[in-house]
Image: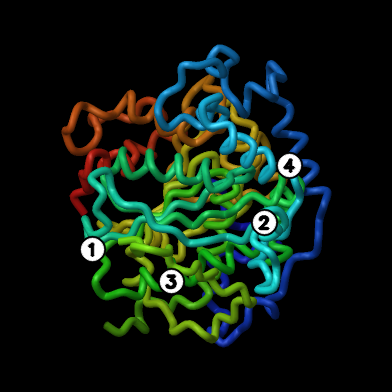
Amino acid sequence: MQSQTKNRSRGNGAALETPVTVAVENVTKPAPRLVDLAGIARDALAIRPPLYAQSIFGPLRSWLPPHRRFSEFGIASIWRPLRTLKFLQNTWLPSLPLSPPPFNPPFLNDLFWQPTVILHRPDHNGSYTSFPEESWFFINGIMTNDAVAQVNAALLSELFHRPVTLIQNSTSSLFVDLLQCALDKEGWKVSEPVTKAFPVIYDALKSPHKRRVVVIAHSQGTIIAAVVLRLLAQITRPAAMDVVPAAAYAPPEFVYPAQEPLDLSDFAPLTEAELARLELYCFATCANTMSYVREPAAGQRPVPYIEHFGNELDIVARLGMLAPRPARWEIQLQGPRFVRPRAWGHLLNEHYLYPLADAQRKGRRRGGRGYAEPFLPFAATDGIPRLYSYINGGAPSQ
């Protein structure tokens, strides 16, 4: 756990003192420091051996078929050429991360506008209503179009037996995605995916019917989650202030989430008890800052609960949770960290969820096997990941 004593603000939990009427666009932002980004990237690239493609896509032998059902490599399938072509179009043709104007012809919308959208997928049995006291969200990373995001969400639903709300951070091409990462990572601007993600997570936390709000984030999604947490912290009151089917003939007209800038005065304050429902499980965390609003105390979990998972040789994880010199670049991440030693690869399903399932899943038994593998604790005090207890529809004891 990194020390939280740095003076230069990146908008972490200290923002509790900010009045809840502050608009996001008026929040003081740190001065742009491109040298930080360059330094973090340079450190991440100092990987030995310097097999950068393998760091993202895993060992060469895994690139070839056959692939497992929900593997991201399955997107490039000779049996579904149109899906493959759409993936290449979405990831390499620059587009705008905004809702399309109403006067556009539909084919232009798909080419040049790729907004973040909110979608729902059922659990492994096709139910949207199982575990009514929980809300599960998934925020994907860069270079992820709708096909890849759906594959990721499908494996999450199958592994944890929960319906999942997909906050699909639609790719707008590699260059635009990296620009969004830089803006959010250094705190220079609240990007469009954050604007779409914040209200739905906030609504779940405010619901009196929800006991747990679980957010699974991957890659750029961890940066988005970090900014959402910072904004939630700004409107959270200290504990002392707490007060208690598709249409038959035509599909429904799609409604894009609002994309106007966030103004925190539009949202009623959160209590610490409401924020305590939030659990963040981050894979390949590349955010600079993710802080507790309330530190852990005797017999009490921190608020919110946070865990980080990273493959040791994943370059993206080396931009954040596994950065070689975190103090030098003011990378301040709280929460237990779990690392898969000498493991390559950055893809969520292929390199994170499948290894987790192989090591921890036992038939239909609920929960994990009672040990930490394949992700070992970064520090002796980090213990066994809480996330494992959700496997096959299980749940933590508290």
Q: CA distance from mark 2 to mark 4?
A: 17 Å
Q: Mark 4 or mark 3: name the one nearer the start of the chain.
A: 4
Q: Mark 2 or mark 4: name the one nearer the start of the chain.
A: 4
Task: Using the image, tell me which numbered label, if any, was put on residue 107.
Answer: 2
Asked if the residues shown at circle 1 and circle 3 are in contact, with their CB atoms under 8 angstroms apart, the answer is no
Secondary structure under the numbered disc 3 in the rendered image: helix
Residue drawn 44% across the image and 82% down it:
269
Q: CA distance from mark 2 to mark 1?
A: 40 Å
Secondary structure under the numbered disc 2 in the rendered image: helix
Q: Nearer the viewer, mark 3 or mark 2?
A: 2
Q: Nearer the viewer, mark 4 or mark 3?
A: 4
Q: Mark 1 or mark 3: name the one nearer the start of the chain.
A: 1
* Residue type beneath disc 4: Trp
- Which x, y percent locates residue 51? 69, 19
Secondary structure under the numbered disc 4 in the rendered image: helix
Q: CA distance from mark 1 to mark 4?
A: 40 Å
Q: Mark 3 or mark 2: name the one nearer the start of the chain.
A: 2
Q: Residue 23: which quarter of the image?
A: bottom right
Task: Using the image, tell me which numbered label, if any, was put on residue 92.
Answer: 4
- Give neighbour class at mark 3: few <14, some 14-19, many 20+ (Cα, 10 Å): many
In the image, residue 1 above or below residue 186: above
**Residue pointed to by mark 3:** 202
**Residue pointed to by mark 1:** 133
